[in-house]
Amino acid sequence: MTIWVDADACPKPVKEILFRVAVRDGIRVIFVANQRLRVPSSPHIGSIQVPAGFDVADREIARLAQRGDLVISADIPLASTVVNNGCLVLGPRGDIYDTSNVQEALTSRNFMDEIRGAGTQTGGPRPFTRSDHERFSNSLARILSGRHSPGDEGWD
C-alpha cells in the first residue's frame, strides 16, 4: 500500500503524523502538491510537485493511486474518483470514505456547491482542532491495523 497525500491544503499536524508513520512502519507516503514541499529524508517518504492549476494535484493522485492504496484528502470529488478505483480515502479530520459512503458525501458536497453558487454564504471550513488531530490519528491507526481494509463491507 502507498499513502497518497493531497498536500496543498493538508494541515501540518496531519503531515507530521504521516511522516512518523512512514518512518516507523515503513509505509510509502507520497505528498503531491503544486508547490515545493519539505519532507524528511527517508526512503519511505517522497513528494511530487505538479504545475499550479485547478485540481492538478488531484488528477495526478487519481492517475497514480492504485487499488488498495490510501489517499489522504478533504476533496470529495477526488475521494469519489479514487474510491471507485479501489482506494480508501481518509480526510484530514478523520473521516473515512469508501464505497458505502462516498456517493452520499459527494451528493452533499454538490448540494452545498449549488447553494454557494446561488449566492448563499455558507462560511468556510472550521479551524483544524486538537480533536480533529486525534480523530485523524485514530482513524489512520484503524486503517493501518486492518480494522478497516479492502475486505471490509463497503470497500471493494
Image (cartoon, rainbow, N blue to C red):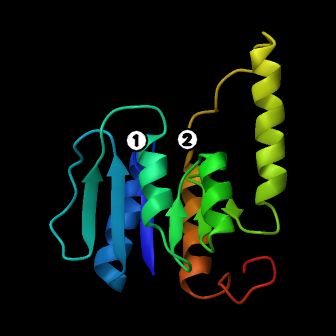
Circle 1 packing at 10 Å, graded few (<14), some (14-19), many (20+), is some
Q: How far apart are labels 1 and 2 at the CA level? A: 15 Å
Q: If you read the primary sequence from the N terminus, does the residue marked by circle 1 or circle 2 appear first?
A: 1
Q: Could you say whether the residue bearing mark 2 is in a helix, strand or loop?
A: loop
1 or 2: mark nearer the eye: 1
Q: Which residue is mark 2?
A: 128
Query: Residue 77, percent across and down?
Result: 65, 47
Q: Position of residue 112 (x, y in %)?
A: 80, 30
Q: Report the side of 143 relative to 115 (left or right).
A: left
Amino acid identity at mark 2: Phe
Residue 142, position in %: x, y? 62, 79
Q: Which residue is mark 1?
A: 8
Q: Amino acid at mark 1?
A: Asp
Residue 112 against residue 65 in the figure, above or below: above
Q: Nearer the viewer, residue 1 or 135?
A: 1
Quadrant that contains the C terminus:
bottom right
